[in-house]
Image (spheres, rainbow, N blue to C red):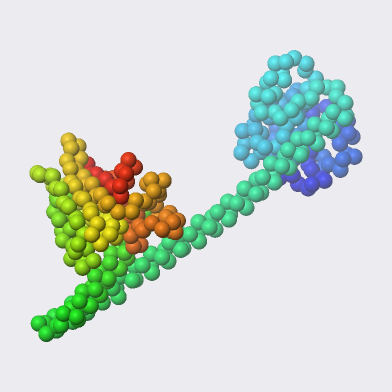
Amino acid sequence: MVSEVNNPKILIVDDNKENIDLIAYFLKPQNYQIYTATDGVEALTQVENTKPDIILLDIMLPKMDGFQVCERIKKNAETRFIPVIMITALKELKDKIRSLEVGADDFISKPFENVELLTRVKSLLRIKRYHDQLEEKNLELEEKNKALLKMDQFKEELNHLIVHDMKNPLFVIQGNLQMMEMGLGDSISPMVQKYLGRIDRSTQNLLRMVLNLIDVFKIEGGSIELSKELIGLNELIEKAHERIMDYPENEKKQIELILADKMPFIKLDTSVMERVFDNMLTFAASNVGSDGKIEIQTFITETEVGVILHDFGIQIPIKYSESIFDKFSQVEIKNEGFRLGRGLTLTFSKLAVEAHGGSLQVDADNKVGNRFIMKFPLS
């Protein structure tokens, strides 16, 4: 950092005291702080102790020549941005090339004009000042970025805590509903049964949203533990189909299952994947009209098994085919009038499938509705 705007520190390195005095004589009217050294070793000590803003370095020095001194300065992370002007009586081109190779910022040949010396010094000091200002700004930005990251981590932890604590009252609500149904037994009226069913489905939806959020945090943090067991995709889809058709609003919707024969079993976490299929089917069902159409197809190849879920409803624009799964894009897409399900339905589904080594993506070539393709490796 340039020590003071109008009072920079200059180190003059020359084994001839008369040369030092002459250079100092030219520089003192500019109100510079002058430091001196008469050999290469002393020069490096002065650089470490005084942290000069610019160095005027003679090439022909005892103990360590100017080339070696310059190279040491430029290889040191703490001093490499200090400008170095090589001063030499040598005229050969190879010496100038050598000066540049060791990192010198400029060079000047003896004898030199005082105006030339002052101009070069002022020019390099100005560049050094700009660099120091940039370094200060970078440090400020780095500190602000650390503070933002810390705040973001705090928000994530707080969100996770809140979401996690939401599970307990939901379990209590569901448990009490079951106790009410058991207590009422056969005496329950159709109207009460209808409303109890609505409450139960709503709590199930809310619980699924909460569990999705918790698992998104876990997967992103690398802390989710999957309890895998052998199961078939056809079985998971059939159960998800039964659950979705149990909702009165889906009674007239056409949900066609096209399930491949002889589907092999693969290792999946059943509870996690049940939520994935519930999420995907709920999204599809909410995206079609009261008598809309949905197709669910399973397939098998030599290396993988998969599911294609195609709803013939409102198509989400292809430009969102990647960001549709990004939790930070949900608000933007919904603000444009497109439904993505409740909470982080699609975000959780993609992360959960990928946690099993699979993939979930939107078919960008599809023309009607939304076509999702889910794949799992057979291995």
In the image, residue 137 lies at what x, y percent?
Answer: 65, 49
What number of labels is visible?
0
The front one of 174 and 215 is 174
Q: Position of residue 99 (x, y in %)?
A: 70, 23
Q: Residue at x 75, y 30 (%)?
A: 85
From the image, which quarter does the C terminus lie in? top left
379 to the left or right of 60: left
Q: Residue at x 76, y 25 (%)?
A: 107
Horizontal relation, residue 29 to residue 284: left or right = right
Nearer the observer, 256 or 269: 256
**In the shown orientation, is residue 224 left or right of residue 2?**
left
Query: What is the quadrant of residue 89 in the picture?
Result: top right
Residue at 78% from the left image edge and 35% from the top image edge: 123
Asked where in the image residue 168 lies, by quadrant, the reply is bottom left
Q: Residue furthest front?
A: 291
Note whether 111 is above or below 2 in the view shown.
Answer: above
Determine whether 141 is above or below 303 in the image: below
| Residue 32 visible at all | yes
Residue occupying the point 88% across, 26% down: 113
- Of 21 and 241, nearer the camera is 241
On the rendered image, what quadrant is the N terminus found in? top right
Q: Is residue 229 visible?
A: no
x then y, percent, for residue 255: 19, 55
Eyeballing the image, is 13 above or below 226? above
Residue 90 at x, y percent in the picture: 77, 17
Q: Quadrant of residue 264?
A: top left
Q: Is residue 185 left or right of residue 19?
A: left
